[in-house]
Structure formats: C-alpha cells, structure tokens
Amino acid sequence: MQSKTSCFNLTLLRKNVIRFSPLWIVYSAAWFVAMPLLLGMQLSSDWPPELNDVIQILGAFMTSAGPVVACLYGVAVAMAVFSYLYSARSVSLMHSLPIRRSGLFLTNYISGLLFFVVPNLILCGITACVTLVGHVFCPGMLLAWLLGLTAMELFFYSFAVFCAMFTGNLLALPVFYGVLNVLAFVLWWSISMFLEPFLYGFSMTDRAAVVEWLTPLARLYDSVSVVWNYNAADYSFSTASLHGIPVLVIYAAAGIVFAVLAYAAYRRRRSESAGDIVSVRWAKVLFRYGVALTAALTIGQGLYGLVFMNSRLSGVPVRLVCMIVVGAVGFLVAQMLLQKSFRVVKKSLRGSVVCAAVILLVALGAQLDVTGFVSRVPQVGQIDFVHVTVSGNDAASATVQGEEAVEKVRALHQGIVDHRSTAQRDVWNTDYSDGSGNSPLYVSLSYRLKDGTVLQRNYDYMTVRESDLEDASSLTALAQALVDDAEFRTKNALGPVAGEEVDGEAVTLTGGCFTYYNAGVIDVEQERILTEAEAQTLAAALREDAAAGRTERILVADRRSDAEQQAQDGEKRYVNNLQFNYRIGSSVDTGRAYIDLSVDMTATVQALNDLGILNEYVTLRTCAEHDALYESRYQDGNATVAVYEDSYETDLVPESATESA
C-alpha cells in the first residue's frame, strides 16, 4: 500500500480539540457568564437596561477586558498546541509521523485559532438572541465585539507561537512572551534614564510612536474605545461607535505576519533543541547580550537609585560602575542558562568586557553630543508651530506660530544651549526668598516641524535674576522678551479662545458662564450662564483687549523691588472670571477655558455692560474691594456693615462696576 505525506491532518486536529478542551471550555464559560448570562439577568430585572446601556456594556467588555484576556489566552493556547516541542521524546515522535512540517505547523496553528474563533462566534450568537428577546438588539456593537476581540486574540496568539519557535523550554515561553510584550517600553524608560544626565534638554516624555506600537497592551488600551456620537442640535449623546478600528486591523495583520515568520522558523528548527532555553543558534548571541545590556539598564540603574543616588557617592561615575557590574552578572547568568552549567566564568569575561565597552561608548558619545541632539535648534522656516511653557516667578504657556513669536522662542532656545555650562544652576542652594529677585526657571519646548516630526526639549535647574534684565543676551531677558510677545501673551491669557483655530482645527464656542458676587455678599459665588452668542461677543472683546496689551503682564523674574506694582495688583484684578465652553474640530469632548478679568480689560467690561450682564446686583469687584468687605465684617460700629450671626451679607454698597456703569 502506497503511503502519502499529508500537509494537514484532521485526526491531529480532533485530538488537539479534545485533549485541550479544558482550555477552551473555561474560556467559553467565563465569557458566557460575563456576557449573555449577566446581560440576560439584567434584562429580566425590574429595571432593564436600555439600548444605549447595552451598547456601553458590550463595548466595555471588548475594550476593557478584551486586551488582557487576549494576551493571557493567546499564550496559553500556544503553550498547549505546541507543547510537544519541549520534550525530546514527543518531538521525535511527532516529527517521525508521515506529516510534513508544514502540515504539523498548519494543523496545530489552526487548532489554536479554533479555540477562540468558534467560542467567539457561538457567544456572539447567544448574546444576539438574548438582546433580541430583550428588545435591545445592537448588531453593530455585537459585530464590533466579535471582530475586535478576535483581531486582538489573533495577534497575541500568533506572537506567542512566534516566541514558541525560539525556545525549547515550556516555562521559558511565557517568560519570553511577557518580556517581549513590554520590552520596548522598559528599554525606552531605562535608556531615557541613562541618557538624561548626558543630553541637556532630554526628557522621558519624548516617547517615540514606535515604542507605543511595540507595547501592544498599552497601545490597545490607549487607542481602542467606545465613543458616543454627539448631537450638536440638542446637546445630547445619541449612539455609540467603536473607535480604533485601524489599530485592530494593523495588529491583526501583524498577527498574520508573525504566523508566517513562525512557520519559517519551525521549518528550520532542530528537533534536538528540545529542552534548550534558546533553540535557534543565532538567537543565542542576541540572548546573551540582550540579557546583559537590559539588566545593566534596568537593574543596574535601579541599584544605583536605591543605594547610591541619595548618598555622597551619587554621580555619573558610580551609575556607570553599577551598570557595568550588573551587566557582567547578567551576561554570566545568560551564559549559565544556555550552557546549563556553572563553569562559564572564563567564557563570560569577553562578553562582559564588550558590554562594559558598549555602555561607556554610549555614555561618552552622549556626553560629546556626537548626534547633535543638544545643540539642535530648528530654523524658523522648518517650524510649523511650537508649544512653549515658561515657568519662573509666573508660569505661562502658549502655542505660537507667528514668525516674530517663533523667532523669540528660538532665541531663548539658542540662549539656553549657548549658556549650557552656566545655565544649569543648583536651584537647591539658591535662596529665592531673600528679596534679591531670583526665581527658578523651567522651559519646555515642543516644536511641530513642517515635515511632520516633533522636536521636544525640557530645561530646568536654571535661575533667572531681575538684575539680568538689562543684559539682552541673558536668559532672563530672553525669557521676558518671549512672554512679552503679543501673540504669546494673547494665547497664554485666552487659551483656545484666542483664535478661531487650534493646530489647524476650528474652535467652536458653545457657551459659558460669568462668576460674580451679589453686591454686598462675600461668601456665595454665583454664576450667570452665557449663551453661545454672548460667549462669542465676549471672546471678541477679550481678543481686542489682548491685542492692545491690556491683559496682565507675565513676570519671569521675581520683582520684589517693584513695591508699587505689587500694591496695585489687588486694585486691578477682579475676583470675577469668565468661563468658556468649547469644542475643537469634530471632537465630541467639551473643553473649558477660564479667563481672569482686570480693570485694564476695558473692552471686555464694556461688552459685559452692553450685553446687560452687569447691573446693580451682578457686579465686578476688585480683589482689594473684596478683601475690604471681608475685613469690614469684623469692624464693630461700621455704619455700612450689618453683621448677622450666620451670614456674611452686608448692606448694598457702591462697587467699581456700578460706578463705572
């Protein structure tokens, strides 16, 4: 009888389904209890959920529980269907059967797929029947749950299968799988910690998009969500839809790619590698140096932080020594795991020296700024817009794109770079309360370049002094020139209300409110709701005041010597403020901007009067007037004050707004 070599074996498929049935039965039972059973119980209660509630429940199951379930279930299924690879006896038996390697891989891989595709289909059908009976049938969200969960499981399962091809130890598989799922984020964090002391202006907030994509769980939780569609006509939320479908499609496609790569690795995998920590020869080199360098970056820096950072031995040299020592230990441990022996010290010396050299060379290159990171300041023609935060005596932030304002940002950035050796001052040893006009300075810059890239820098541990304002090249003068710029000052004071667009997207004012105290009342702040038309009128008046420079000036250095200016602050600032509600672009989220008012903002005060918002009871009140009213409560015999036992109310008295009106 002629024998045939099969590329797919139905008997093996059936045996996998039966042998590993506890796995998919537990999975199915858990989802059955979570979805159709509990949902059916809620629908049969005295207060059954409505359609929108059911949509939200199904969406929450997929977006909240889906990623972590897919991550854990994917590796469990991969460990089950490819468990024969980790025993010399079982792998020899399987590879002696008249089935091609491609047939073995395809049969086992499809077995794993069936473990979540079939239960998902059945559960979706049962849930559909439950919602139909309960008159809350939502086919769109049910389909989103089915396809979204399956896409996530396809990715995590295929990635686990790919990891399974590179190890011959069953216990090593979940370790490799878990480490690789978070390795990009861990390396980004540890490398950032390593480079921050060397690269002036570098910050761990400068996370690249590739790091987010290489951390699947974080990316899925950040990008996949249920979004309620906003109805602008009646300010209500109507239906919900799944947000993040492109992310799910990309990860599903990546799962198919990992499956193909796993198949290619399986065809070249040696049966004799069963039991080895790493089953592929070239991957062993990567394992040795990867473990050593990762240990140096994570455990080495952690050791420095725990033991030496707050001691007299703190500093870059001690940090490097900790990293080199831990890196050598990491290389030694990796070599022991690969060789299955403790006699590997001599063989590990060369690798430890290579790791130490890599750490020192990277540190030296960063210190010498061989990549030009520290000295890079983009040209005006390269910049689309820049978001800048300056925090000294006062804090201010704005997104500017006008040529004049952008040039002042560049001037400050270049000044910080040029004064690198003197800009970094020890703020902990500076007394900022001695009346000398010193202030700690923090500057954050985020450039959006015209080629679509983002350049970010963060500078702290700098000091600005009032005495340096006369020197145009000093950091104090450069920072003050920036915050005095008309565009910066306007956008800092008004935020999104400063213009009709933010980063190219339209700003729509939807209303707001005006806060006030009734005349003579000092303890109950009240609100007067603004219509959309009133909000737009007041926003136009605010922009007029800002353009004329009638908003409060930002002071970078502490002006303790300007006593007259400080005395006038309470007489100029109102306790009142305006709140604006707005939406940016097509977003359904409503933002809020708070604007403090002052006596100098004459156009805004006039607009409040013209709109009829101000009257004898709804008034503007300066901080000085408010403080005086509060203090007058405790002055016995004051003819203008009527004190009650449980009230801060006083007799009506003339205030600034009623007088000006």
Image (tube, helix red, strand yellow):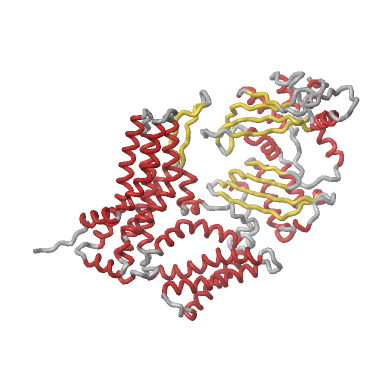
Residue at the (67%, 37%) spot, across then down: 491
Q: Position of residue 70 (x, y in %)?
A: 40, 50
Residue 172 appears anywhere in the view: yes
Q: Position of residue 195 (x, y in %)?
A: 60, 61
> Which of these two is toward me, 547 or 265?
265
Residue at the (66%, 64%) spot, across then down: 309
Q: Residue furthest left?
A: 1
> Which of these two is toward me, 92 or 512?
92
Horizontal side of 255 relative to 616 (left or right) equals: left
Residue at the (37%, 32%) spot, across then down: 138
Q: State the image quarter where residue 515 is shown.
A: top right
Q: State the image quarter where residue 636 is shown.
A: top right
**Quadrant holding the N terminus:** bottom left
Q: Residue furthest front?
A: 46
Q: Position of residue 411 (x, y in %)?
A: 69, 50
Horizontal side of 69 relative to 433 (left or right) equals: left
